[in-house]
Amino acid sequence: MTTLFDSFKVGDLVLKNRLVMAPLTRMRSTQPGNVPNKLNAEYYAQRAGAGLIVAEATQISQQGQGYPGTPGIHSPEQVAGWKLVTEAVHRAGGVIFLQLWHVGRISHSSHQPGRQAPVAPSAIRPSGKAFTADWQMADFETPRALELKEISSLLADYVTAAKNAKLAGFDGVEIHGANGYLLDQFLQTGSNQRTDKYGGSIENRTRLLLEVVDAATAIWGKARVGVRLSPHGTFNDMSDSDPVALFSYVLGELGKRGVGYVHLIEPRSSNAGAGDGNIEGAPDNSKIFRGIFKGTLISAGGYTPETAKQAVASGAADAVAFGRLFISNPDLPRRIQSGAELNRYDRNTFYGGDAKGYTDYPALG
Ligand code: 8OZ
């Protein structure tokens, strides 16, 4: 029977256990410039006991930013900052991928070059609140629909970011295709009403994601590229007319491409971890989609150590990602393995701030 403490493979990489640190937005980069720093390096190195760390969502361009203080991977300073992180994690024996992110319509004009409107597949305003550049909450704005001729420069931004991630010493990249950000906005009918080759049919809506995956694969090799998806997720006002058909197609295509892994978020986890408690009766993505994607599957969202053990033992997932529990337990794998008590997390220190609630959670002695 497979346990959380058996090694697993992502392509040629052998990972020491099946506990993945989920990508976690913490909004603690150095300002101005959204540059990763020594404190960020210490935080990640503390968590190097994970089989795989997926570093926090990181904007590929200024246009891709949607929250204050999130790091980027589009300037030389950011590459140098991330090098501090990857070197610290590698010294501590860890493996770390970078999550490449463009928020699309979830941005706010205060983050945008020239204070322009955020961009999206279609000019459909999501309901809810944006997080402005000066840390205020404001209604989402109506985005501007990307023109067809802008797609090539968007892809070029992903290419630059993927190359920069390599320069910064990461072990691979994860494409953020989840949680209602740009690539997910293209996938789903609630946010994509385009009539060109990026809208309409499932194939057309999936085109941009696959072009990004292919571009990243050309730089990294297929095994070092993972993809995160959130079928049935409603965070950031998402909806699709036929999510099972859509994501079955997406997973089939990712399977053909032989990507290193797919990282599926379970919709029971309320608001992508922005709330506590699990939603009862939500669809079970790892059950629905496991048969379609034969490659390495990481499952995330609302797991306990017990349910994670079961998921790996039953083969529902190859590995399980923890977010909130990795925030408060830098040595989470060791604690789970030894049955030690877990530190509770403090939601008040999730986003922004300093070492408090970031690098000061205690490890076992
Ligand atoms: C919570 C707060 C801010 C960002 C995601 C990157 O949902 C996020 C995120 C989550 O993937």
Image (cartoon, rainbow, N blue to C red):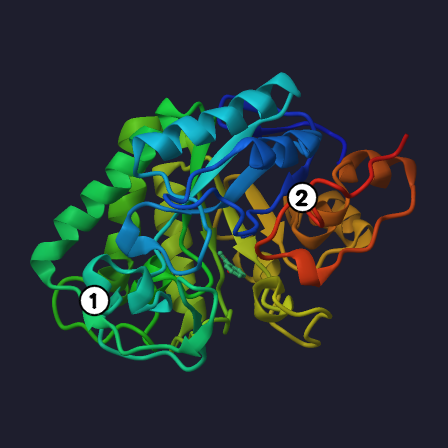
Mark 1 is on which residue type? Gln
Assess mark 1: CB under 8 A from ligand 1? no
- Give the spatial CA distance, label 1 vs label 2: 34 Å
Mark 2 crowd level (few <14, some 14–19, many ≥20, 10 Å Cα): some
* Residue 77 seen: yes
Which residue is at 14% across, 62% downward? 197
Vertical position of residue 143 compared to residue 336: above or below: below
Q: In the drawing, what numbered circle is on residue 116?
A: 1
Vertical position of residue 203 compared to residue 53: above or below: below
Which residue is at 45% across, 72% downward? 236
Assess mark 2: CB under 8 A from ligand 1? no
Taking the image as shown, residue 77 lies to the left or right of residue 169, namely left
Quarter of the image where one finds residue 49? top right
Quarter of the rendering occupied by the N terminus: top right
Please tell me which residue lies in front, 23 or 298: 23
Closest to the camera, between mark 1 and mark 2, is 2
* Residue 318 seen: no
Which residue is at 52% across, 57% downward? 289
x, y percentage for residue 81? Answer: 45, 30
Mark 2 is on which residue type? Ala
**Local SS, label 1:** loop
Quarter of the image where one finds residue 115? bottom left
Name of the residue lying farthest toward the left: 149
Q: In the drawing, what numbered circle is on residue 275?
A: none
x, y percentage for residue 65? Answer: 36, 55
Mark 1 crowd level (few <14, some 14–19, many ≥20, 10 Å Cα): some
Vertical position of residue 246 compared to residue 226: above or below: below
Taking the image as shown, residue 205 lies to the left or right of residue 247, namely left
x, y percentage for residue 178? Answer: 45, 58
Quickly name the residue at label 2: 355
